[in-house]
């Protein structure tokens, strides 16, 4: 299952996020504290802080693989021609292939909109501690830290 995670850090680099995430890598079940087997910054949760819709951005589209970019399947009849591209010949890429969205990393104190559901999302604090909820309170208490949107698979 894919889960939203917020990582708080004073250095919002890929290498630092990897360092923070590493203690929670499942490692094929060898880590009793493991939480994830795969992650990416943004992913299915990209646009969380600014309502960016990655699936509507043309940069995250590609020729439809199911109909060969024709807009019509030849192996079956489907309403709208193709159930992957809806007859357009262009389909949305898989979220793991979406272009990185810069706004998925923001200073916690500058984030204008936090979705309601985020209160129940896990987060990793700037000291590397995992917490199952309380992300909003932590963000408000630490406005100078960067908040990084992470999509992880468990």
Image (cartoon, helix red, strand yellow):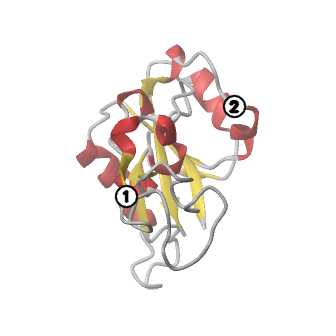
Q: Residue at x 76, y 32 (%)?
A: 116
Question: Viewer-nearest of labels 2 and 1?
Answer: 1
Q: Residue under circle 2?
A: 115
Residue 152 at what x, y percent from top left?
A: 49, 59
Badge 2 crowding class, 10 Å Cα cut-off, few under 14, some 14 to 19, many 20 or more, is few
- Can residue 125 be seen in this snapshot? no
Residue 61 at what x, y percent from top left?
A: 38, 46
> Is residue 80 found left or right of 56 in the rendered image?
right
Note whether 104 is above or below 55 in the view shown.
above
Residue 145 at what x, y percent from top left?
A: 44, 26
- Can residue 11 be seen in this snapshot? yes
Instruction: Return the disc, 2 or 1, that comes first in the chain's sequence.
Output: 1
> Is residue 76 found left or right of 105 in the rendered image?
right
> Is residue 43 found left or right of 119 in the rendered image?
left
Give the quarter of the image for residue 60: top left
Residue 13 at what x, y percent from top left?
A: 26, 38
Give the quarter of the image for residue 100: top left
Note whether 93 is above or below 46 in the view shown.
below
Note whether 39 is above or below 53 in the view shown.
below
Badge 1 crowding class, 10 Å Cα cut-off, few under 14, some 14 to 19, many 20 or more, is some
Q: Residue at x 45, y 75 (%)?
A: 26
Q: CA distance from mark 2 to mark 1?
A: 36 Å
Q: Residue at x 67, y 61 (%)?
A: 79
The secondary structure type at the circle numbered 2 is loop
Note whether 50 is above or below 40 in the view shown.
above
> Which quadrant: the N terminus?
bottom right
Q: Residue at x 47, y 38 (%)?
A: 54
The secondary structure type at the circle numbered 1 is loop
Q: Residue under circle 1?
A: 69
> Which quadrant: the C terminus?
bottom right
Instruction: Name the mark on residue 105.
Output: none
């Amino acid at each position: 299952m894919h889960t939203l995670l917020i990582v708080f850090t004073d250095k919002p680099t890929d290498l630092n996020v990897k360092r923070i995430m590493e203690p929670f890598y499942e490692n094929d079940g060898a880590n009793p504290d493991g939480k994830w087997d795969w992650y990416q910054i943004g992913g299915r949760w990209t646009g969380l802080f600014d309502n960016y819709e990655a699936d509507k951005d043309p940069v995250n589209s590609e020729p439809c693989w199911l109909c060969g970019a024709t807009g019509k399947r030849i192996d079956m009849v489907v309403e709208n021609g193709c159930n992957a591209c809806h007859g357009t010949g262009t389909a949305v890429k898989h979220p793991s292939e979406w272009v990185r969205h810069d706004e998925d990393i923001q200073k916690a104190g500058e984030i204008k909109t936090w979705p309601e559901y985020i209160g129940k999302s896990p987060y990793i604090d700037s000291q590397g501690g995992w917490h199952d909820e309380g992300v909003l309170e932590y963000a408000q208490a630490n406005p100078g830290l960067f908040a990084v949107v992470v999509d992880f698979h468990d």
